[in-house]
């Protein structure tokens, strides 16, 4: 388990991840640590099913689309970092690549984060079965505590 006061918060720009970011700010200030925002840029599962693995040659149009999506993600993450940073809180932004649960756990370990904070989407039944639960996988595999923040009511 990490000894760090730093907090890693997984951001996908959903309402749930925004609630998690707000909770992570409060936690980071209480612990006296830095806040690390992590957004994961990954190849859609459907591309993998088509046989386009990580080392596969991606057609030029798709490669450009992935690059543009990464740039847009970086822009949004930079804006969120600027919004959350203040004189009392050090905030860092990171973009990860790969399956989200693995990337989140690996980044927390690499940074020595003491806690991972992430939102939940509140899926149940067939959607949860089909899409899986990133939060559940992170909770099962992380070496540090994981705080999950439910979707805000309303």
Image (tube, rainbow, N blue to C red):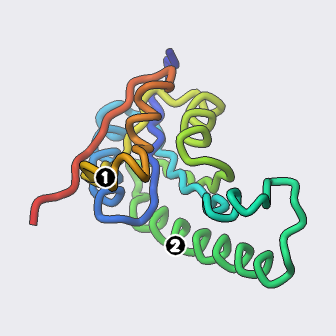
Q: Earlier in the sequence, mark 2 or mark 1?
A: 2
Q: Tell which of 84 and 132 is nearer to you.
A: 132
Q: In the rendering, at what x and y percent does residue 17 appear?
A: 35, 56
Q: Residue at x 45, y 60 (%)?
A: 12
Distance (Cα) linking label 2 and label 1: 31 Å
Crowd tier of the residue under label 1, counting other residues whose Cα lies within 10 Å: few below 14, some 14–19, many 20 or above: few
Say left or right for 151 vs 131: left
Residue 135: image x %, image y %? Answer: 39, 40
In the rendering, at what x and y percent does residue 30 appear? Answer: 29, 34
Q: Position of residue 96 (x, y in %)?
A: 65, 51
Residues at marks 2 and 1 touching, judged by CB atoms closer than 8 Å? no
Q: Check the image and report above or below for 72 versus 122.
A: below
Secondary structure under badge 1?
helix
| Residue 22 visible, this angle | no
Residue 93 visible in the shown view = yes
Front label number (2 vs 1): 1
Query: Please, what secondary structure does the residue beneath circle 2 have?
Result: helix
Front position in the image: 30 or 79: 79
The residue positioned farthest toward the left in the image shown: 154
The structure residue drawn at horizontal position 51% and vertical position 20%, both measured from the top left corner, is 143
Q: Which residue is mark 1?
A: 126
- The numbered mark at residue 108 is none
Identify the residue shown where x is 26% and y is 45%. Answer: 149
Q: Nearer the viewer, residue 89 or 17?
A: 17
Q: Quadrant of residue 62?
A: bottom right
Q: Which residue is mark 2?
A: 76
Q: Quadrant of residue 58?
A: bottom right
Please tell me which residue is depicted at 71% across the width and 73% down the height of the picture. 66
How packed mark 2 is, by other alpha carbons closer than 10 Å (few <14, some 14-19, many 20 or more), is some
Identify whether 147 is placed above or below 26. above
């Amino acid at each position: 388990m990490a000894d760090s006061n730093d907090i890693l918060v997984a951001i996908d720009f959903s309402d749930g991840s925004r609630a998690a970011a707000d909770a992570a700010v409060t936690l980071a200030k209480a612990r006296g640590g830095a806040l690390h925002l992590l957004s994961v840029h990954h190849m859609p599962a459907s591309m993998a099913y088509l046989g386009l693995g990580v080392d596969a040659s991606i057609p030029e149009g798709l490669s450009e689309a992935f690059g543009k999506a990464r740039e847009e993600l970086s822009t949004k993450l930079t804006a969120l970092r600027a919004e959350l940073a203040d004189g009392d809180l050090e905030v860092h932004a990171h973009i990860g690549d790969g399956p989200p649960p693995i990337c989140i756990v690996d980044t927390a370990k690499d940074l020595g984060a003491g806690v991972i904070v992430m939102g939940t989407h509140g899926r149940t039944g067939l959607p949860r079965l089909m899409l899986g639960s990133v939060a559940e996988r992170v909770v099962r595999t992380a070496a540090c505590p994981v705080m999950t923040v439910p979707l805000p009511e309303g």
